[in-house]
Amino acid sequence: MDLQGFGHLLLAGTWITLQLALTSLLFGILLGLLGAAAKLSTLAPLRWVASLYTTLIRGIPELLLVLIIYFGLTELLLRVFDVYVEISAFAAGVTALSIAFGAYATEVFRSALQEMPKGQKEAAQALGLTPWQSFYHIQLPQLWRIALPGLGNLFLVLLKDTALVSVIGLDDLMRQAYVAAGFTKLPFTFYLVAAGIYLLLTIISMQVLRWMEIRANRPWQRHAES
Amino acid sequence: MLGEWILALSEWLLTLTQGQEPWDAYARYLPRLMDGVWVTLQLVILSGIAGFLLAIPLALMRIARSPGLWMLAYAYIFFFRGTPLLVQIFLVYYGLSQFESLRNLGWLWTDVLSQPYWCAIIAFTLNTSAYIAELFRGAIQAVPVGELEAAQALGMSRRQQYQSVVLPRAFGIILPAYGNEVILMLKGSALASTITLMDLMGATRGAIARTYLSLEFFLLAGLLYLLMTALLIGAFRLLERVYNAHQHATHLSVKKLDAQLRDEHLEQQVK
């Protein structure tokens, strides 16, 4: 399907959308881990900061977050440090989407960490592992399995939220569809094609997630069979 | 009252961010922001209610035995949950103008289908109904079998069973999740600003375009969104308390209930 010559543009946009989603996923997971660690910390100020983070971010629209990062951050740097830093739409998008993803991922990781048997932590302690070692070698490898379904749902949300970054001019799938719709005067056709591509990405992600979940649960399956 | 409070808060923000005096800007644009808040609330409430009403037949279709019915509902739900809300809004607002036959509909076109306000409401309604239908489907299947059997034993017809047992019960079950969905809708409603609607987000962007005070107005908007979120959370907690009063009253004695009559939904809450 040539789509009046706009087919390859939509494909290029899809590639940007994918890059945006995967980069934000990476940073979002890091933020989520940090947030969960802070929420379960013994230091009260860390817990407050983490709670403030999740409450604030979950209460404001993602679009507002994207705009604050793109326009507001430039303004803030200009006023405080008197330097003009131009933030690219991609960087602003990744920042905003990671922050949003991280807030929800914090809750997923927190409940996954709490779900882990306490005995393991105590065993690690008895073996003389430092808290960091115990976290890195004992808890983290198991964390993925428990957190995977929750993170998977969040990724599907993230994939759709990437469309918001088109508002600040990133040439993602949504923006390319907008441009194509403007040129050809066929808005319904192009937005429907874009919707179809998003749907396809969702289906592929769901399949990959299902495969990952089966893989992550393999040791337990084997155990149950024998 | 709320306006005064916000004004005081914005004064404070002002002293924090800079020493200049965008006083006029504040005085001038705050009322517009409040108008925006009102538009946002209208969008959320209207599409929240309409989406809810649309979700009931959708959920019933989804659990129907006829393959034509459930596949149709499944496709609808899959489409609206699997594509970005922004695409859906653009499909309605920009997309519909592609069809000559729609443009010839007279007042329906000029007053409804070409107006950003109604297009936003239509898109939000379609979107949220897909999510709520999915919640409803789960809840209908979670209604304890015993209650259905009791209704049958009383000689109720299928229609009566659904009307006076299954649906009210399912509503109670989805209420907390429905509250979450409405809050997601509140956040999603900011997208209405992309089709020129002057909701809170639109009013904020308008104020920034004229005053260049991006930080102040963005933070103010964030604060107003947070207030609305808090308001909605409170409202749904209250609704939950009133509608599911039986659960709150029996909260602690659930374990003493007859194991066969007790439903799992209550049991989970005790855990």
Image (tube, coloured by chain):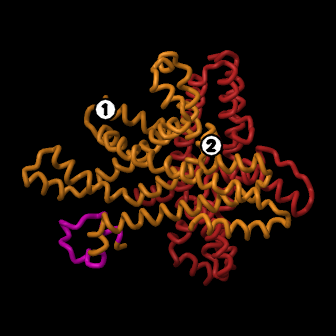
Chain colours: A red, B orange
The disc placed on residue B168 is none
- What is the three-letter code of the residue carrying label 1? Leu
Is the Cβ of the residue at disc 1 closer than 8 Å to that at disc 2? no
Compared with residue B256, is residue B193 higher up or lower down, i.e. above or below? above
Q: Is residue A26 visible?
A: no
Q: Mark 2 points at which residue?
A: B193
- What's the residue at 37%, 58% (across, down)? B175
How many marks overall?
A: 2
Compared with residue B105, is residue A85 higher up or lower down, i.e. above or below? below
Which residues make up the magenta segment? B251-269
> Closer to the camera: disc 1 or disc 2?
2
For disc 2, the chain is B
Query: What is the quadrant of residue B217 in the picture?
Result: bottom right
Quadrant in the picture for the C terminus of chain A: bottom left
Most foreground residue, A144 or B250: B250
Left or right of residue A204: residue B235: left
Q: Can residue B169 be seen in this view?
A: yes
